[in-house]
Amino acid sequence: MEYDAAVIRCFLEQQDRLFPEPVADSEEEAEYFLEDVCAVVVNSKKEIEEYFEEEGIDTEGEDVLNIAEVFDVGDGRFLIVEG
């Protein structure tokens, strides 16, 4: 999967939601990290729910938009990074 500039910037700016220390300091490091962990970009809350269901992760009763692994790109898309 290729990650565009908006997705990479989103991760760089918000990575502290998921990790106690930065895992990437540059756009190149962020892109490599996202590729390495097979991060996924989806287009809706419904797609986030479907992703977690397919992965066998129970999110019942939780707002998936508040899960630490879900990053709001800011343009209607969401980045899912499993740490």
Image (spheres, grey):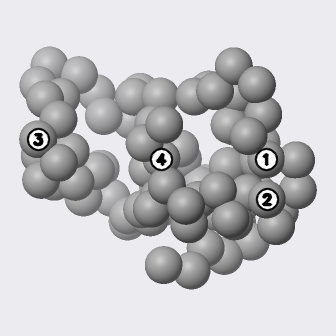
Labels 1 and 4: the sequence-earlier one: 1
Q: Are the two marked residues, 1 and 2, in contact with CB atoms closer than 8 angstroms?
A: yes
Front residue of this view, candidates 71 and 20: 20
Residue 43 placement (x, y as % from top left):
37, 65
Q: CA distance from mark 1 to mark 2?
A: 5 Å
Q: Residues within 10 Å of mark 3 (few under 14, many from 20)?
A: few
Front residue of this view, candidates 11 and 75: 11
Q: Quadrant of residue 56?
A: top left
Q: Amino acid under label 1?
A: Ala
Labels 4 and 2: the sequence-earlier one: 2
Which residue was labeled with disc 3?
Answer: 56
Q: Are the two marked residues, 3 and 1, in contact with CB atoms closer than 8 angstroms?
A: no
Q: Amino acid under label 3?
A: Gly
Determine if residue 70 is in view: no
Which residue was labeled with disc 2?
Answer: 29
Q: Residues within 10 Å of mark 2 (few under 14, many from 20)?
A: some
Labels 3 and 4: the sequence-earlier one: 3
Which residue was labeled with disc 1?
Answer: 24
Q: CA distance from mark 3 to mark 4?
A: 15 Å
